[in-house]
Image (cartoon, rainbow, N blue to C red):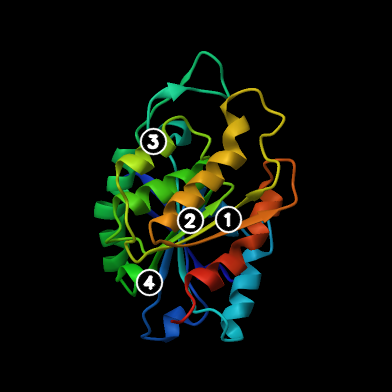
């Protein structure tokens, strides 16, 4: 990857990694944007070949060219969690439950900044949000909170085991908003856990079933894995993008 393809930016003291498509500098074209949690780990070239595969698909005309925005988290256990809850990873600590503040930042502050800074297609059908694990949870939470902003949602092994998320979803009396949601997870993730993570698979299926029953365009991919695996989960990013951004 050429260094010019990646812009190291910052907004409100938060670091951003902006991946520009090939030919961006030489064109006047506008591009769809995908906002990525955890500084864009889903496409980080050091971790996988996902970005290369996505760009190959764009070259072949099977995907549009994208602008990807990797967003740094100040504290993912705080910003990516919708409610205050005991921290299952660190006994004695808590999840901060500041998702509403972070989601508002993404929708009302960061997106307008990116739209003003880069040549984007700003409409929601051209705007995606994606993440892995808690990053998948906050992506769904943010998009369902701001359906007029984010039209394409990707949740990779999303942490739907998180206490209260099913109840929150149902209390919204959510109906089809015209969004598309892609979800994946390993078939036995969390099965051997004794904490709340044991609800990973059943709760993910409940989210899928609930949205499907309420008219959402949603797809769930369940692959063979007994573990919460970043390496396996991210391999589905290119296919997810094809499904999310497919032509009508």
In whole angstroms, how far apart are the C-alphas of marks 2 and 4?
A: 13 Å
- Vertical side of 130 occupied by 89: above or below: above
Q: Position of residue 209 (x, y in %)?
A: 49, 51
Q: Which residue is mark 3?
A: 167
- Vertical side of 104 occupied by 248: above or below: below
The residue under the point 53% across, 40% down is 203
The residue under the point 66% across, 48% down is 230
Q: Residue furthest front?
A: 213
Give residue 130's mark. 2
Q: Position of residue 120 (x, y in %)?
A: 34, 73
In whole angstroms, how far apart are the C-alphas of marks 2 and 1?
A: 8 Å
User: Can you say which quadrant of the picture contains the N terminus?
Assistant: bottom right
In whole angstroms, how far apart are the C-alphas of marks 4 and 1?
A: 19 Å
- Position of residue 8 in the picture relative to residue 119 (left or right): right
Q: Reading the chain from its start, which is encountered first: label 4 or label 1?
A: 1
Labels 3 & 4 near each other (Cβ < 8 A) = no
Q: Nearer the viewer, mark 3 or mark 2?
A: 3
Q: Which residue is mark 1?
A: 42
Q: Position of residue 114 (x, y in %)?
A: 32, 63
Camera sees residue 74: no
Crowd around label 4: few <14 · some 14–19 · many ≥20 (10 Å): some
Q: Residue furthest top?
A: 92
In whole angstroms, how far apart are the C-alphas of marks 3 and 1?
A: 28 Å
Q: Which residue is mark 4?
A: 126
């Amino acid at each position: 990857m050429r260094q010019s393809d990646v812009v190291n930016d910052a907004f409100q003291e938060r670091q951003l990694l902006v991946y520009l498509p090939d030919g961006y500098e030489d064109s006047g074209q506008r591009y769809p944007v995908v906002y990525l949690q955890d500084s864009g780990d889903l496409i980080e070239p050091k971790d996988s070949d996902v970005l290369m595969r996505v760009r190959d698909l764009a070259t072949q005309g099977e995907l549009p060219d994208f602008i990807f925005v990797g967003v740094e988290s100040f504290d993912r256990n705080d910003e990516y969690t919708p409610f205050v809850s005991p921290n299952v990873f660190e006994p004695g600590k808590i999840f901060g439950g500041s998702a509403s503040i972070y989601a508002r930042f993404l929708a009302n502050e960061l997106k307008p900044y990116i739209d003003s800074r880069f040549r984007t297609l700003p409409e929601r059908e051209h705007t995606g949000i994606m993440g892995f694990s808690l990053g998948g949870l906050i992506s769904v939470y943010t998009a369902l909170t701001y359906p007029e902003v984010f039209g394409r949602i990707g949740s990779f092994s999303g942490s739907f085991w998180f206490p209260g998320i099913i109840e929150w979803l149902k209390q919204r009396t959510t109906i089809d908003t015209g969004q598309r949601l892609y979800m994946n997870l390993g078939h036995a993730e969390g099965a051997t856990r004794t904490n709340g993570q044991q609800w990973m698979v059943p709760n993910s299926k409940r989210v899928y079933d609930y949205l499907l029953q309420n008219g959402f365009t949603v797809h769930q991919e369940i692959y063979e894995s007994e573990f919460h695996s970043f390496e396996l989960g991210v391999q589905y990013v290119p296919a997810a993008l094809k499904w999310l951004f497919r032509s009508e």
